[in-house]
Amino acid sequence: MTSTTSSEIPSHLSAADKRALNAALTALLRGPDKVRAEQIRDKIKEDGWFPAAASAAHICQRQSLGLRPWESPPCSCPRPNNSPQGRLLAKMLSFGLSRFDLDPARVLHMSKAS
């Protein structure tokens, strides 16, 4: 896990958001792709914790959902709406997940199980 300072963390983030962002960072920093890990370490140094963590969540969600280059993950959607990522974000939030959850595909399984 990476260290953070309160000045780097946007005040609107919930505890669940912070956990999800840290999980995404950890997944990429400890993952098999050493080049990606180095890119994330550089982003932390250059831009700070939140931009690096948000990028990590974006990457993890794209991989989890198998998105095409022109498709956006739910973490990049500002609020639930009628777009595919907005509808998925609404489902994620309704299940109590963070918008930054690194595996949003599981919400699809959760909604089928209910």
Image: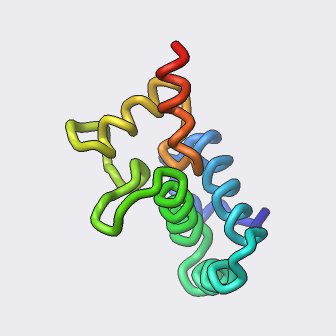
Residue 41, image x, y percentages: 67, 81
Residue at the extreme top of the image, as rendered? 114
Q: Which residue is drawn at 58% across and 81% down?
A: 43
Q: Where is residue 6 in the image (x, y as percent from the top left)?
A: 65, 60
Along the line of sight, which residue is nearer the eye, 45 or 72?
72
The answer to whether residue 94 is left or right of residue 49 is: left
- Give the quarter of the figure containing the N terminus: bottom right
Q: Is 80 placed left or right of 74 in the picture?
A: left
Front-lying residue, 102 or 6:
102
Residue 81 vs residue 32, the one in the foreground:
32
In this view, 63 is above or below 84: below
Question: Is 99 situated above or below 51?
Answer: above
Q: Which residue does the image show at 63% across and 48% down from the upper left?
A: 20
Residue 15 falls in image quadrant? top right
Query: Hey, which residue is sitting farthest left in the picture?
Result: 82
83 is higher (above) or lower (below) than 29: above
Q: In this view, does 52 lie to the left or right of 84?
A: right
Question: How many marks overall?
Answer: 0
Q: Residue at x 33, y 50 (%)?
A: 77
- Residue 52 image position (x, y, % from top left): 57, 71
Q: Which residue is drawn at 52% across and 43% down?
A: 104
Residue 85 position, x and y percent, is 33, 45
Nearer-the-camera pick, 102 or 13:
102
